[in-house]
Amino acid sequence: MAAWMAGRQKWLLHPAAKPLIFMVCLLPFAWLFYAAWSDQLGANPAEALVRATGDWTLRFVCIVLAVTPLRVITRTPALARFRRMLGLFAYFYVVLHLLSYSWFDMGFDVADIARDIAKRPFILVGFSAFVLLTPLAATSFNAAIKAMGAKRWQLLHKLVYLIAGLGLLHFFWMRAGKNNFNEVFVYAAIVALLLGWRVWNHWAKARRRVSNNAAVGVH
């Protein structure tokens, strides 16, 4: 078991690991590009692109949230080196989502987009998630961490929890129009599990600190 864990850690630290994960993260984009070019997006390709890019945004947000629990549970610290890249891919797909909506649904008419945001709550919620995700992407670099300081940077990046909630609400409202909530419940369960683990882990750490302090006090 120990040898297997060491081998996994070694592979994740290999120079080829990041380029490989990068290429895997690009696969959804490559498929959508090919499907659009080969006319395989169905009767309404514009709607298919908007929805697919939104789905992949939410999936990558979930993957980012899963990195820390997986790192701790599997005792694989090297997983942390992929979190930044995965977060940037979440932003990449949300930009594609916004561009698809702005182009196919709104014809890049800024006034129409503004009216749609003001008129439809689920568009407002989705746009808010994009706005909140933007500073996270902009500060996902070592220079930003140094400039902001580690504590302020960590506090800013806790917005990912709010972003996940807004993304779920956006998805829920979008699916409500067709009374189709199956996928919504799946994503909600995943996010709840990942956030619940964080709450439990924080509580467990606090309890250990109290126990350790009490033990020191006894001695």
Image (tube, rainbow, N blue to C red):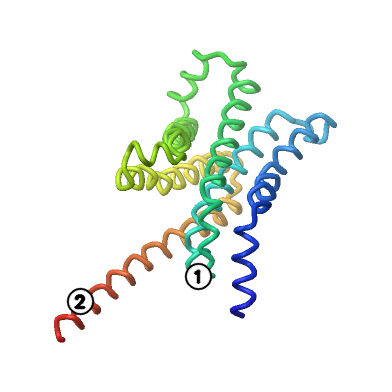
For the N terminus, the quadrant is: bottom right
In percent of width and height, residue 43 lies at 78, 32
* Crowd tier of the residue under label 2, counting other residues whose Cα lies within 10 Å: few below 14, some 14–19, many 20 or above: few
Residue drawn at point x = 66 percent, y = 53 percent:
17
Total labels: the figure holds 2
For residue 53, what is the image quadrant? top right
| Residue 5 sits above or below residue 88 on the image | below
In percent of width and height, residue 20 lies at 69, 50
Q: Amino acid at mark 1?
A: Ile
Question: Which label is found at residue 73?
Answer: 1
Residue 15 is left or right of residue 34, and the answer is left
Question: Which label is found at residue 213?
Answer: 2
Residue 145 is left or right of residue 208, and the answer is right
User: Mark 1 near mark 2, Cβ–Cβ under 8 Å?
Assistant: no
Residue drawn at point x = 78 percent, y = 35 percent:
41
* Crowd tier of the residue under label 1, counting other residues whose Cα lies within 10 Å: few below 14, some 14–19, many 20 or above: few
Q: Amino acid at mark 2?
A: Asn
In percent of width and height, residue 69 lies at 48, 63
Is residue 197 in sight in this rendering?
Answer: yes
For residue 146, what is the image quadrant? top left
Mark sitting earlier along the chain (1/2): 1
Residue at disc 2, secondary structure: helix
For the C terminus, the quadrant is: bottom left
1 vs 2, front mark:
2
